[in-house]
Amino acid sequence: MPYLPTSQAFLEQSALLLEAYPETTRITTKYSFPHQKKPQPSSTTNTSNTADATSTTPAPTTAPVAALTLKTFNPTAGICLKYRTNKGAEVGRLITGLGKLAGGADVASLGVAATGGTGGGMGDVEMVDAPAEDGAAAAAGAGAGAGAPGGSGKNAGGKGKKKGGKGKR
Amino acid sequence: MASHLSHDEFFSSLTDLLSKTSQKTRGSVFLTQKPLLDSKSTASLTAGSSNLQPSILIRATDGNTNAPNPKSKDGKITKITSSKVKISTVASPDELEAFYARYAEVCKAGMSGLKKRDRKRKAKAKGGAAKGQKA
């Protein structure tokens, strides 16, 4: 269950998974707040001096930051792709991306924005047909590609090598 | 499963659900999307990936995470009537774009618990941002 480094990588890999298994793949978006620990009862039973000190401390604690976790899961292939963020600015882009995925968008239409090239698209399509291990390898490769745009051709080669290594073992 | 809501009902319920969760700063909201396949559309899909897209089923639930903690202070488990929110709607292929435009707006507005865009920290956070991009 890899967490992908960028939202672009997540959307691209999800598109590939949806392309391979359009009927059984589902995307879940979880908006959640972290589990909150209850304040320790021992602090309230202290003397008045320390009680004053502790009463001031809760004030500066800011509200907990929620997290947004996106998960693309295919139960039959057992492939699960995840992406996690806590930035509010990303919500709009992510949901729009999910809309494109729901509409059956392919990698080319998603990938133009960030990776700059669709040349690696063919190689990627082959990857998803392979079992989960290769999916993870492809995900890692795509992540590296998104991190360094412009070098997508090189990355496609790297992915192929990675896949071969895993297959032999 | 209860019948699907119309888009308007779904969005108003979802807005409500997200704002409640954000106010409480506790609990989760789960949003799921998957293709809705009836026997007819499955047949057409298997016949040879035709350009006929299936409708998309969108579900939203709080997974009962907004219910109070069932364990009271005494360690006794008090039974609470379920308050789980569970809503769903269906978007056909031709209304997908309009649906997701509204969906994005509702989510952007409702998910106020996420980090806001912080312009003040821009100058200071340059090193940090570079680090984040590498990771």
Image (tube, coloured by chain):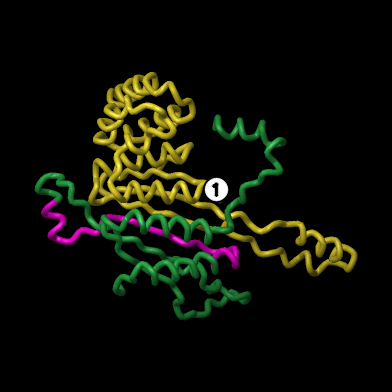
Chain colours: A yellow, B green
Residue pictured at 52% horizontal, 61% vertical:
B110
B104 left or right, relative to B39? right
The answer to whether A137 appears left or right of A18 in the picture is right
Between B37 and A78, the residue placed more toward the observer is B37
Residue B34, placed above or below residue B88: above
Secondary element under disc 1, as helix, strand or loop, is helix
Q: Is residue B40 magenta?
A: yes
Q: Which residue is mark 1?
A: A89
- Above-or-below relation of A101 to A34: above
The answer to which of B70 and A154 lies nearer the viewer is A154
The N terminus of chain B sits in image quarter: bottom left
Residue at horizontal 34%, vertical 19%?
A157
Query: Would you say A151 lies left or right of A45 here?
Result: left
Quarter of the picture containing the C terminus of chain B is top right
Q: Which picture quadrant has residue A132?
A: top left
Q: Position of residue B61 (x, y in %)?
A: 42, 66
Q: Residue at x 31, y 74 (%)?
A: B2
Q: Please name the amino acid that badge 1 sits on.
A: Ala
Q: Position of residue A33 (x, y in %)?
A: 56, 58
Subunit that carries the residue with mark 1: A
- Percent coordinates x, y for residue A153 in the rendering: 37, 20
Identify the residue at the far left of this view. B47
Residue extent of the magenta highlight: B21-44
Q: Residues within 10 Å of mark 1 (few under 14, many from 20)?
A: some
Q: Residue at x 62, y 47 (%)?
A: B117
Residue A138 at what x, y percent from top left? 35, 31
Residue B115 belongs to magenta span = no
A140 in relation to B80, above or below:
above
